[in-house]
Image: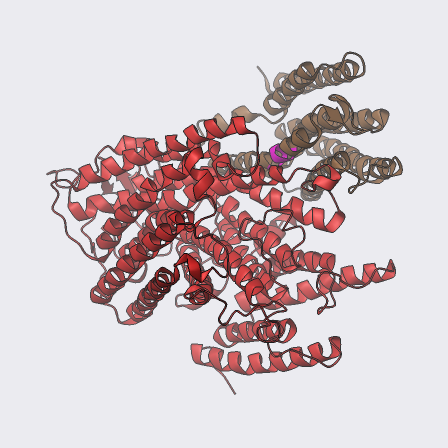
Amino acid sequence: MIKKNTVGSGLLLLLIAGAVGYGIGFGLDALISGGTPKLAGAVPSAFALLFAVSAFFFGLYGYRGITRGLVWQVVGTLLGGLFVTGIRALMGMTGNKLFGAFFFSEPAWVFGALMGVISFLVGVGVMDDWIKWARGIDTPEHHEDKPGWEKYFGVSLDHKVIGIQYTVTALVLISVGGLFALIFRTELAQSGLQFLSADPTKFNVFNQTGPQFYNTLMSLHGMIMIVSILLGISGIINYVVPLLVGAHDMAFPRMNAFAFWVAVPAAVLLLMSMVLGGFDTGWTGYPPLSSRAPVGVQMFFWGVFTAGWSSILGALNVIATVLRMRAKGMTAMRMPIFVWAAIATSIIAMTATQLIGLSFQMVSFQRLFGMGFFDPAKGGNPVLFQHLFWFYSHPAVYVFVLPGLGVISELLPVFVRKPLFGYRWIAMSSLGIALVGFVVWAHHMFTSGMNEYLRVPFMYSTMLVAVPTGVKFFSWIATIWGGKISTPTPMLFVLGAIVVFLLGGVTGPPNAMVALDLHLHDTYWVVGHFHDTIFGGFVFPFFAAIYYWFPKATGRRMNEFWGKVHFWLMTPSFLMLTFGMMFIGLRGMRRRIADYDAALGFDNTHLILTICAFGIALSVLIFFINIIYSIKHGEKAEGNVWNSRSPEWQVRSPMPAHNYEVPFEVVGEPYDYGLADSKYVEFSATAGKKH
Amino acid sequence: MTHKQEKSSMLSQGVFIFVYLAVLTVLEFGIAITFNSTVLLVVIALVKAVLVVYYYMHIYKLNAEHEGDEDSYEYKSGTNRIGLWLFLVSDSFVFGGLMVMRINLLGLTHPHLDQTLGLIVTGVLLVSSFFMNRGETLMANGDRKGFITNTLITFVLGLGFLIGVVFVEWPNAIAEGITPGSGPAGAAFFMMTGMHAFHVLTGLIFLLVVLNNARRGLYDEKHYPVEAAAVYWHFVDVVWIFFYPALYLIGAIAK
């Protein structure tokens, strides 16, 4: 019998429960479908997956925290679904025209999914204190975590634990999204359909043929990556911002925990969408296609809706923290520059996110209740959806990149030993990008058939974004100029980020031009441009931040050699990938298609792109191994590893539970590297009480 | 000013603001049924919203000073207040989005609804906001009993509003042929009132929690939850200040 919670027992239970779940699902499927169960059918796969994941966490952690949350989510989903199914049966409604294999109808699935999310949150225990408060019971302000790894699998109120939970979840989702990309990238390596066959007898996974499954993977690659990016930036912001401003925690620790935990059932819903028939709309979910897609699209809608709450509440918390909990003497213009980036990104995330939630909710209601918001046959307007959707989804890319650009500005002075050039300009450019970002959304819709007089103003407002972004580039170059540059792994990723983001930046304005965009719209050019901006603005800085702050979190350094291998393998692969995408895009390669005509002559390029994609995957695998190895066996690094002026590096790593044991006071400018006798912070017992 | 005078002046301020709001609502209705000027209706809604945001929701409290050190109850309440207002800003983007949807789909028309019922539910919500403000003022002056009485009235009126919209207005509209699936007017009407009713419901739950804790003697000078419940309740009222003309008054009746 397994006695101790370990990874080994978790994996053992995973295998056993996966097999048991598969058996149960297979039997059920045989019952439902009348004796013709499919080997990779939805029911067996779903049961195997649910059993396996829950059992893994059970073996690892026991029946508490995340295990309990997942079990409650499954039970909540089933009970919610049964409830609606029961009511429908009483009203004489049966059957499910959209998804025949499973006995739940679409409303039952939606209600079940929402109940599942709520059950997860109650089960994991993140609402315990709020429920106590509502009943008039006071709780201690700070809960102490037990030392060790176990705190990461249950509810913790410590912002550093939550930051790591966010980051690890983001990395897990990045691998899932990346895996999806590898699958469809492999299919694209050659023209013609190879293993994602259109013939249902040859390829049938979750009731989807090859091209349908391609669409599902392609759509989910987009949205899972977006969610993982949102979690990734939340991870960095959560870990770093309270340390940078000298707070003992975030302003609302319970809401902070809630914002993280609500993202977990959201990720489960997103993955459920693949099992429940998938969907073929792309990550944008435009109606009318999304109002006719299989029931999987509903799981996608509500998964995004739930993940949106994570983003909104997290952002709100960041703003309140920075407004209220800064150390003594930290005026607005003496905040670390990353804090400005976090503020700018939070302003967008807190407000605009509501619009994507609303637009998806409205499509969901259109499907459930026949409300014709976007249905022209009922007097609705499909273009309205695109306006509501892009009002979030364009600023969202600034949510993704602003923290990354903040990381670049934060790390650059440390590694060139020079003051950051134009601090005020960088701070204001972050806000500028955020605010201009609110008025550019319709540049995604030049071909949508919206009013033509809207095109030109949106073209100009879009090009205006280049101004504050350009300010950042000039500042970075001026900061590097004449500095004493050293290139440990974080700095390599910072430099890589600058180069890649520049490529993403200069390929942007062509898309903004109405005349050019009519040609470029929906081609691989756009895909290449987008991946450049996101790798430059998020992925590279994210890796830089992990390499940079890893010693702070663990007291050990990551392996420098393998970090450099990671960088030198990923960067050329990635540059080749996006150059290739833009190259064939300009020559007419459409995006979001499972196959292309061999006569176009793209076969060789696509093969190279696929090889590059595997190169990136290999480099990220190296990164994962490095991170797991370094947690236990990395070189000890408890001091100021990077010789930084930033407050968090002035104390020993890893950080104690409530951060600074002795509070600090800001007495100088943050980035005066290389200036004699200048100090940023001073630690003293009297610095804490500022009001 | 002595404590007692301050209390009575705060209470009479609540009455005055209520009278202004009531007069403006009647004026709004009058304009709608006579010469129906969209501009005037929008202006009146904005004035009403500003009155509620300033005098009932006390937005100026965000700017408070002298809150003591970081561990004091005042300072923490100030942080909570900022958190709540940031949430309201975020939430108003939902309602803003619904308004954009309504303007895009319906333009200068509104669904064919029962005007009397609309005016009644609007009035009920307005009166509930008045009693909420009164209850909060009494609590701030240490009168827990007065708070409970007034908040109970608020709760009953709020419940009345909810019943009026969901169990009277909705069946009425469906009987008139305005259903969720009947067209843009029905879709906009049910989505907007539904989303608002959901917020009223959460506000009612919030009021119940506060009432229950007050009954058990939990609040004294430390009564931030009371203020939070009141501000949230008034916010729900502000949303209706815009939704009422948008759904009942502006423009001609949609076909």
The quadrant in which the N terminus of chain B is found is top right
Q: Nearer the viewer, residue A56 or B230?
A: A56
- Chain A image colour: red
Which chain is in brown here? Answer: B
Q: Nearer the viewer, residue A123 or A308?
A: A308
Q: Please indicate whether residue A448 sits to the left or right of residue A430 in the image.
A: right
Residue A120: quarter of image: bottom right
Q: Nearer the viewer, residue A532 or A163?
A: A532
> What x and y, as percent, mark residue B146?
72, 30
Location of residue A166 with respect to A61 vertically, above or below: above
Q: Please indicate whether residue A216 sits to the left or right of residue B186 in the image.
A: left
The quadrant in which the C terminus of chain B is found is top right
The reply to whether residue B194 is in sight is no
How would you classify the magenta stretch by its main secondary structure? helix
Residue A210 colored magenta? no
The magenta-colored residue range is: B94-98
Q: For the view shown, which residue lies furthest in the top direction?
A: B35
The reply to whether residue A436 is in sight is yes
User: What residue appears at the point 68 percent right and 34 percent down from the top-left corner?
Assistant: B144
> What x and y, as percent, mark residue A288?
65, 47
Q: How was this image coloured?
A: by chain
Q: For the view shown, which residue lies furthest in the bottom direction?
A: A1
User: What residue appears at the point 57 percent right and 33 percent down from the top-left corner?
Assistant: A450
Q: Please indicate whether residue B233 sits to the left or right of residue A480 in the image.
A: right
Q: Nearer the viewer, residue A324 or A521?
A: A521
Location of residue B240 with respect to A612 vertically, above or below: above
> What x and y, as percent, mark residue A286?
59, 47
